[in-house]
Structures are given as structure tokens and as C-alpha cells.
Image (cartoon, grey):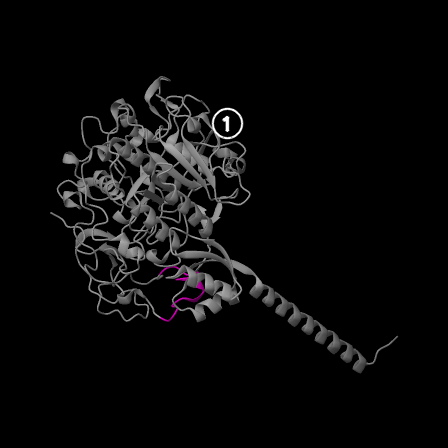
Amino acid sequence: MNLSSSNKITIIRSALSTLLLLSVAAFLFFSNSQTLQKGSYIVQGASKPTLIAAIESVGGEVVHNYTVIQAISALLTSNQAEQIRNNHPLIRLFSDEKVKLSSHKSKSKAGNGVDERNTYFPTQVGASQLHSQGITGEGVGVAIIDSGAAKFDGIRKNSYGKKRTIHHHSVLKGSKALKDEYGHGTHITSLISNSSTAFNSNGDASESYNGIAPDVELTIVKAFDANGSSTYTDVLKAIEYVVENRDKHNIKVLNLSFSAKPQSFYWQDPINQALMVAWQEGITVFASAGNSGSEAMSIGVPGNNPYVITIGATSDNYTPFDLSDDFVTSFSSAGPTVEGFIKPELVAPGGHMQGLMSHKSKIYKDYPEYADGNDYFLLSGTSQSTAVASGVAALMLQDDPYLTPNDIKCRLISSAFAGTANEGELSYSIFQQGAGMINAPWAVASDKVGCANQGMDIANELNDSQHYAGPARRYDDNGDFYILGVEGHEWDGLYNKAHLWPNAHLWPNAHLWPNAHLWPNAHLWPNAHLWPNAHLWPNAHLWPNAHLWPNAHLWPNAHLWPNSNLWGDAAVWENAHLWPNSNSFLDLGSDISSVSFINKWIEQE
């Protein structure tokens, strides 16, 4: 059958119209399904009843009522979330973002496959020296929020061969607390607590162990799934469990080997708020700097919390008894934070760390080249360096059970030793290495107090009446970072590999500093003290006796960044300045010209 031209045109037009209608219908269906799809939010405000009423008024679902912070977890569609923002300007909504564990799968050399081993890192930070003195973390409870922990004798038993006190808990629905399908949690737990004996190069048993604190009590809270993922909601539930059971489980230290991209200022973040409560309740919190790369302003949550102790990672370059080629790893995130705080405070071993891991775990199966054929696995990351620091804190608390979190932070910072090259010049920026490498014997022996978190008040933070900013700034002309009132510590914000201690000697008798100090008289920088009297933040904060934003509202009656994202998918002030030599805070449209900066933080003698 032949069709005329006009009939052909009519058929084509009809087909196009039908296709157009189907496309519009598909678009509307897709848009509507996206609108109706519920997402998880953390909803914050002054009154719990108000929050619940606001959620239910738009048809949302209340999932969890937190006890440690003023917040509710809820399921909301995007339309429902927008209705709450419009109807309740003072309510904050946080998207329940993914949280990642802070291990970095870099190329590593596998172990030698023998059970009589030495993991080296306890010696590198001086923990082995304390082990020989009977300081092993006994009587101290350490909580670990991670992916769980598998059953290994080095974890289940203490150095006496007796069953260790371990409390297991899972916040994940349908996931058994006693299993670690991913493997990361087991690795972290073993770095802290592995009670297996360390052997020397002659194959003889030593008086040390393959974990930092082999006799600690453990509380293992499972918040990360079989793929190593978690959410704000689950992490908050885990922190809540730790705080509520701190006395029951004797929890003194909390290890957080994970990181998330900041969505807000540190004081607005729900995880950071919960950790301030933990710190206030006497729990010393250690957080990983993150593995985003050692360039400026890459610190994640909760490492950006100025109260907690944030840890970066170093590598021994596969020469564990030679300091001269050690370096800060290129993956270890660096400061300053958005609010101008110097982070990380400290660094610790985090490269190719030997830790226990089940053959059945996902990491072990996915990366068999990092396994030694037995029960040990090599992982690198600020996760691992954070575990080392947590273990050292347990040693300090055994020696002095009355130390507060601020005391521990003060002593760790004042006893650390910084990486220096010739004539005391820093080998890495203070924004990359903080005060330097953790030194366990010096930290235990220290009697310093009152030199951490000075001028800052957690109670004011939690009631939203006062918040703080650090001393970091950025030059107008070249964009380098610097510290107000301190010369000689400018940094261009880029990573350049160097050696931490290029002129250092080996440690005879496996002691870290036998009969001598790396820097005479225990000073960080001889002849030029960066922190006189070992005070990191002496007697000052940025806005003494004043509020940053009076009336406790940053932007009353308005939302500065819709959708709960502070800087969306963009870098924080990319190619911009971090408060360059001015009093105009943040330059984000806020009229806060009356804020005055204190140009005092750390002074030189």
C-alpha cells in the first residue's frame, strides 16, 4: 500500500506527539518519584517536642530521639524537608551523609608470614619501653566505634592469657555485634590492644607486645556495615551508647577512625556536638585527620572539632629503626580547619601497619596482596595512627587514672617531638604535623596541666551561646597560611615530601630515646620555642568574654545554604582567602564587622 506525502506527514506528526507525551509523562513520573522518595535527616532545634511536632505536621517519620544532643533523626521527602525549613526558620536540617572509615589502601609490602613477629609501631612511639615497666593499659576502658571485631586470641585475651573484658554492641539493624564482615574494626582494635608478645630480630621474646595497650578493657560498637559505610544517624547512635554506658563499661577513651566531609561549622555538626558531650563527661576522644590528601583545609568531621585530639599519619618508609627517612604520608589530611584551628594536633605511625584481620572479611578478600598468609594484614591510614594515639592515652590513664581529657591532650602535645631538619627548621608545616610525633614515655612522665583548650568552654558551645575560631590566617598576596603573632611558620598549603628527622640516629637496645633526648632539654625546637612553657593555646581565645554571634543565632529567620549543605559540592573557599588580615569574618554576607581578633595564640621567647 502506498501512502501519499500528506498521510506520511500526518503519521510522523502523530508519532512525534505520542513520543513527546510519553517523555513528559516519564519526566513527571520520575520527578514525582524523586519528590516522594524519603531521605534521612538529622533535625535540630531548641525543643524536642517542637522538632517532633514539626516532623509529624508535614507527614515525616521520627526514627530516633537522641539523648546526648538536641536532635531527632527523621525520614522526610525533599518537599517535607523544605516545608519544615520554610515553617520553622530556627530548625536546622542535616542531610544524613555517609561516613567513611579512614584507612588508605596504598601499595605495601606484605609481612613475612611468621607468628613470632614484631609490629614495630609500639617501639616507634615508646610504648614498648612502658610495657617493660608494667604500664600496659590495665584497668582502662577504650571504646571503638567501627565495623566490629573478629575473635582473635590477641584481642580476646590480655597479656596474662586471661579473658579480656569486652563489651560488644551493634547499632545496625540485623547485624551481629560479634562479627566484623568488613575487617577494619578488627585491624584497629588489634593495633590498640593486641596482647601477643613481640619478638626481636634474633627470634627471642621481648618484654613488649604487638599492640600499644595490651591489657585495656574494650567496648566495641558496631556502626559500619560489611562495606565499611555508615551514616550520621548510626554514628550518633554509637556515640550515644558510649556516653550512656561510660560508667558501666569504664570507658575513658573513645577511638574514632573515620571521617566525613564537613557540612557546617564544627559547632553545628551533630557528631561534633555529641563528642563535646562525651568530652565534657570525661571521655578523651581521638579522631582521624582523614585521608583526603595532605593539602590545606582537608580535615574532615570529627577531626575538625577543636576540643578532640586529631591525629595525622607518618610512615617509617619500611625502615622501622631508622628515623632519618620517616615522613608524613601524602594521604594524611592537613589543616587549618574552616574556623582557623590548627589540625592535626599530633601525628603517629600510620603507614603499612600490621594488624589482625579475618580471612573472611571483605578487605582481606578484596586485597589479598596486603595479607601475610596468616592472620595479619597491612593497612595504611589515619585510622591506624588514631588507634596508636588512643592506646597511648590508655597507658597514660593507667599511670594516672585521674587525668581529664584536657590533661591528656595537654601532655600529649607538650611531650610530642616535631619533625625538624637543619637548625630547627620544621620539615613539615605545623598544619601537617601539629606538635609532632607522639612520645609515650614523655607523655606518661609529663606533669603538664592547663595547656589545652584554653579559653574555650564546652558548656557555652552546647548551649549555643559562644563559639570559637583559631589563629590561622591566609595572606592576601600569595595565599600562604600563617599563624597570627608567630613568624616563620608560613605554608603554601601544598604537600612536599620531606624527611621528618634527616639527621637522627638509630635507637640502640630498641629504646626510642635511650639516655638522650632528640632535642636537648626536651624542647621541641631548640633555641626557638614555639610553645613556651609547653602551652599550645596559652591564656587566650579569639573572642574573650564575648559572643561571636550575639543572641546565639547566626542568621536569624533565614537559611544561608538550603539543602543543609554549607558549601555544596564545591571546595571550601576555593582560591579564596581564610580571613586575610581583616575583621570581616568569613565574608559570606553576614554583617559582623564588630568582631575583633586577638593576635595572640602562641608566642616565641
Expressed as whole percent of the image width and height from the top left, the position of residue 391 reads 33, 34
Q: Which residue is mark 1?
A: 373
Residue found 54% across the figure and 33% down from its top:
360
- Residue furthest to the bottom: 6
- Residue furthest to the front: 49
- Using the image as rendered, state which of residue 202 and residue 539 is in the foreground: 539
- Using the image as rendered, state which of residue 10 and residue 211 is in the foreground: 211
As drawn, 274 above or below 106: below
547 lies left or right of 20:
left
Q: Quadrant of residue 248?
A: top left
Residue found 53% across the figure and 64% down from its top:
59
Residue found 19% across the figure and 35% down from its top:
446
Give the class, few, some or many, for how many residues have Cα within 10 Å of label 1's Cα (few <14, many ≥20): some
Q: Which residues are magenta?
A: 557-572
Note whether residue 341 is visible: no
Q: Quadrant of residue 580?
A: bottom left
Expressed as whole percent of the image width and height from the top left, the position of residue 535 reads 18, 45
User: Most prominent secondary structure in the magenta stretch?
Assistant: loop
Is 564 contained in the magenta span? Answer: yes
Note whether residue 9 is visible: yes
Expressed as whole percent of the image width and height from the top left, the position of residue 412 reads 25, 39
Amino acid at pointer 1: Gly
